[in-house]
Amino acid sequence: MSRVVVVGAGIVGASCAYYAARAEWDVVVVERAQVASGTTSRGEGNLLVSDKGAGPELDLMRLSRRLWLELGDELGRDALELDEKGGLVVASTAAGLAALTAFAEGQRRAGVVADAVGDLGSVEPHIADGLAGGMFYPEDLQVQPVLAAQTLLDAAGARGAELVRGAEVLGFAAGAGADRRVGRPLGLALADGSTLEADAVVNAAGPWAGLLGDGLTAPVPVLPRRGFVLVTEPVGPMVRHKVYAADYVAAVASGEAGLQTSCVVEGTRGGTVLIGASRERVGFDDTLDPVVVRRLASAACAVFPFLREVSLLRTYRGFRPYCPDHLPVIGPDPRVPGLVHAVGHEGAGIGLAPATGHLVTAMISGALRSRRDPHSPDILDGVDARAFAPERFAAAALP
Amino acid sequence: MTGTELGFELDGEPIAFRAGQSVGAALVASGRLSWRTTRVEGRPRGIFCGIGICFDCLVVVDGRPNQRACLVAARDGMRVATQTGTGWTP
């Protein structure tokens, strides 16, 4: 049995471990800290088709959505807190609504269900009056990401996968980096001085993937993009769906380093309301910024006026793995045979995790874009993996 | 320390307190151990951490739910109510 070492026990690493274990790989997950202790525990757990325009990321998300529902059947929906809650995108102006309508038309042609909503109050009873309109996306899902990551790792463990916590991969062991021929095991150097041999290595290090890539002589241009989430006191089912402003899509697509905020509001099973979303590239600085908190709170109150009377319990923040072209990097590294990247999902990593794990497993198994077999296909389950290949940075960032 | 005439109401019942006491401390001093029920299973809750972290001791203060009894300073004449569910009515 061949061994794959997955670096990172976030949702992407957990998914890679699960699908690889199911494909009878000998799986070792190496995690620097704890399960889901990075980006996975700092988001909201959205599995959105609604914010993705027609293109490769939407194809990947549509596959991932099917896989999440399958995982719900296999592992139990409660073990993931999988909820078919649906998403409501709202526009405050007629121009915003026209842009949203055009965006949704492109999505429909790609197979997405998007229903125009004239009376927003019929979908969200506590939403503000006076908004221009919106679009309902019944296919948007939610999971509890920390629970989902642990559940996937447990399921991988039941198939023999091993999880090593508190272990950091620094790079290749001395000598192992000099002669990396196809078919030879890769020797990984861990921070405690030990070496771990692997036939395949998956970089699932989230926003730290760039640093790990450097250590593995395979740089990828992944940078941290900070985001805040506000948590209210429990108010019960006042917000029924994921509700966000139409300008969110533009904020996600922006490459701006400075602060971008857009209004994202949703209720949770526990009764709290989560409020996002901010984006800014400030390195790994996790200072609490009250300006961001105020902007997010005020935008949320404009969409849900009842929130003016609701207190915040806390805020949290974390770092999304940002890639300059807003597409994940999923594929074999052209410089290091045996190394596969599964990184750069920015804010969509929870949603895209199962499809990522599925593709990565196909790649290391030679069924998709394998370095071991250059004649393997590029397309799997409706996803053209070439869009995510690390080679696309060849001119810019790859040496 | 001597008692004073200060008091607030809990669900209409008078609760005496000393100046500077929190609502939670006054409730415990009155012999009460729980004054809230949990959202899902309706289990009793009162003071647990006592320092504002655990959100177990929630009460409705002058109509506002989810106030931490351990942090709210008791005021003469305030109206405190036990909380069930989230304290909010959709």
Image (tube, coloured by chain):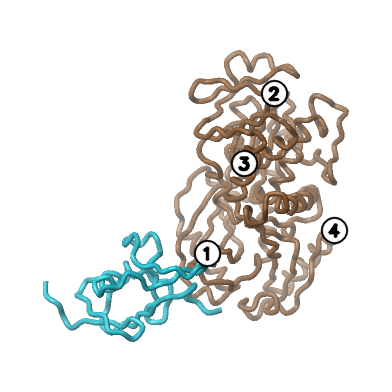
Chain colours: A brown, B cyan
Residue sitting nearer the eye, B11 or A296: B11
- Sequence order check, earlier mark of 3 and 2: 3
- Sequence order check, earlier mark of 4 and 1: 4
Label count reads 4
| Disc on res. A153 | 3
Q: Name which residue type carries label 4.
A: Gly
**Residue bearing the label numbered 2:** A199
Q: CA distance from mark 2 to mark 4?
A: 38 Å
Q: Name which residue type carries label 3.
A: Leu
User: Would residue A76 appear left or right of A173 to someone viewing this image?
Assistant: right
Subunit ID for the residue under disc 2: A
User: Would residue A220 appear left or right of B49 to someone viewing this image?
Assistant: right
| Residue A159 x, y percent position in the rendering | 67, 36
In this rendering, do the residues under marks 2 and 4 share a single chain? yes
Q: Name which residue type carries label 2.
A: Asp
Give the residue at x 52% y 64%. Answer: A295
| Residue A138 x, y percent position in the rendering | 75, 65
